[in-house]
Image (tube, rainbow, N blue to C red):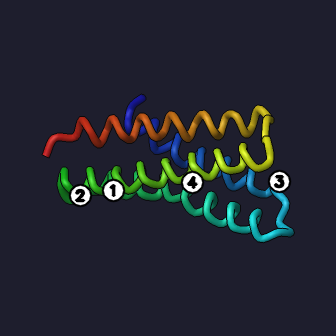
Amino acid sequence: MRQNDLLITTFTFGVNCLKFLRTLPNDDSESKLIRFQLGKSATSIGANYEESQAGSSKADFKNKVKIALREARESHFWLRVLEELDGYDSEEFKALLNESNELKNILAAIVNNTKL
């Protein structure tokens, strides 16, 4: 995947997570917590990767990608919590879970391959 493709992928992932979160119940404290946390982390992946593209140095670029990676890991965590708590099994949910895992792997590879 080229880095420009990753800009689109991270943006789309964030939007798709927000759309999915609209389908969750919003009447208990657990759901509210997960909606808030997943919404923040999923959109932060793309925001930080977007910022990395204008990094002032390789170190700045790598730092922003590391932040995006942490957010991808957090998003994956919250999706796994949802899976465990509520047994989500829809194709939409499986795609988000898979995409979060792929984003973790891609961002980790960028971090590991960026020489300072």
Which mark is on residue 60? 2
Q: Are marks 4 and 1 in contact (CB under 8 Å)?
A: no
Q: Nearer the viewer, mark 4 or mark 2?
A: 4
Determine the residue positioned at 75% across, 65% down: 30
- List the single residue furthest toward the front: 84
For numbered disc 3, what is the local secondary structure? loop
* Residue placed under numbered mark 4 in the picture: 42
Q: Earlier in the sequence, mark 2 or mark 3?
A: 3
Percent coordinates x, y for residue 111 in the rendering: 29, 42
Disc 4 residue type (three-letter) = Ala
Disc 2 residue type (three-letter) = Asp
Q: Earlier in the sequence, mark 4 or mark 2?
A: 4
Q: Earlier in the sequence, mark 1 or mark 3?
A: 3
Percent coordinates x, y for residue 18 in the rendering: 69, 55
- List the single residue furthest toward the top: 1
Q: Are marks 3 and 4 in contact (CB under 8 Å)?
A: no
On screen, 33 above or below 45? below
Nearer to me, 43 or 87 = 87
* Residue placed under numbered mark 3 in the picture: 23
Bin the neighbour count of mark 3 within 10 Å (Cα to Cα): few under 14, some 14-19, many 20 and up: few
Cα separation between marks 2 and 3: 37 Å
Percent coordinates x, y for residue 100 in the rendering: 55, 41
Cα separation between marks 1 and 3: 31 Å
Cα separation between marks 3 and 4: 16 Å
Q: Are marks 1 and 2 in contact (CB under 8 Å)?
A: yes
Q: Earlier in the sequence, mark 4 or mark 1?
A: 4
Disc 3 residue type (three-letter) = Thr
